[in-house]
């Protein structure tokens, strides 16, 4: 079952689908958290370019370790914790 662009699935659904390899679910998670990931990275790095790189790296690490997210309903907190641990 694929996602339509008009759907607004919750984080839990997106995480479960992303774990199954659905590219659209991965894209939606990234789009949903891109601004907050950048803002956190900017507060740490203080530089636009470094913040973009740090946010991108955080997504790569988190998506690679997505199976470690024990409670998909709490993806937001899990992702932000991953980002804090991997500035």
Image: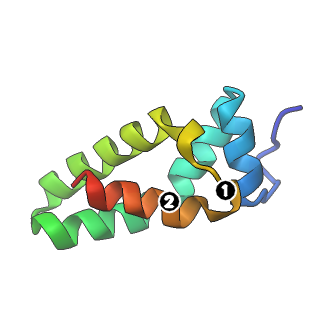
How was this image coloured? rainbow
Is the residue 49 above or below the residue 41 in the image?
above
Front in this rendered view, residue 85 or 30:
85
Label 1: how many Cα within 10 Å (few below 14, some 14–19, many 20+):
few
Label 2: how many Cα within 10 Å (few below 14, some 14–19, many 20+):
some
Reading the chain from its start, which is encountered first: label 1 or label 2? 1
- Which residue is farthest right? 1
Of the numbered discs in the image, which one, if any, rests on residue 54?
none
Which quadrant: the N terminus? top right
Is the residue 63 above or below the residue 42 in the image?
above
Which residue is at a point 31% across and 70% down the rendered structure image?
A: 39
Residue 84 image position (x, y, % from top left): 29, 62
Which residue is at a point 75% across and 60% down the rendered structure image?
A: 10
Which residue is at a point 72% across and 28% down the rendered structure image?
A: 20
- Residue underneath mark 1: 71
Q: Report the label total.
A: 2
Residue 25 image position (x, y, % from top left): 67, 41
Which residue is at a point 82% across and 54% down the rendered structure image?
A: 7
Residue 30 image position (x, y, % from top left): 51, 49
For numbered disc 1, what is the local secondary structure?
A: loop
| Pointers 1 and 2 in contact (C-beta within 8 Å) | yes
In the picture, measured across the screen, residue 81 lies left or right of residue 22, that is: left
Is the residue 43 above or below the residue 56 in the image?
below
Which quadrant: the C terminus? bottom left
In the picture, measured across the screen, residue 70 lies left or right of residue 36, that is: right
Front in this rendered view, residue 79 or 59:
79
- Residue underneath mark 2: 78
For numbered disc 2, what is the local secondary structure?
A: helix
Between marks 1 and 2, how big is the CA–CA gap? Answer: 9 Å
Residue 18 image position (x, y, % from top left): 66, 36
- The quadrant in which residue 42 appears is bottom left
């Amino acid at each position: 079952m694929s996602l339509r662009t008009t759907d607004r699935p919750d984080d839990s659904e997106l995480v479960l689908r992303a774990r199954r390899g659905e590219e659209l679910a991965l894209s939606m998670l990234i789009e949903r958290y891109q601004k907050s990931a950048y803002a956190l990275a900017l507060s740490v790095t203080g530089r636009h370019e470094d913040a973009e790189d740090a946010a991108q790296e955080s997504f790569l690490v988190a998506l690679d370790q997505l199976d470690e997210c024990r409670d998909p309903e709490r993806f937001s907190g899990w992702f932000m914790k991953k980002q804090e641990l991997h500035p």
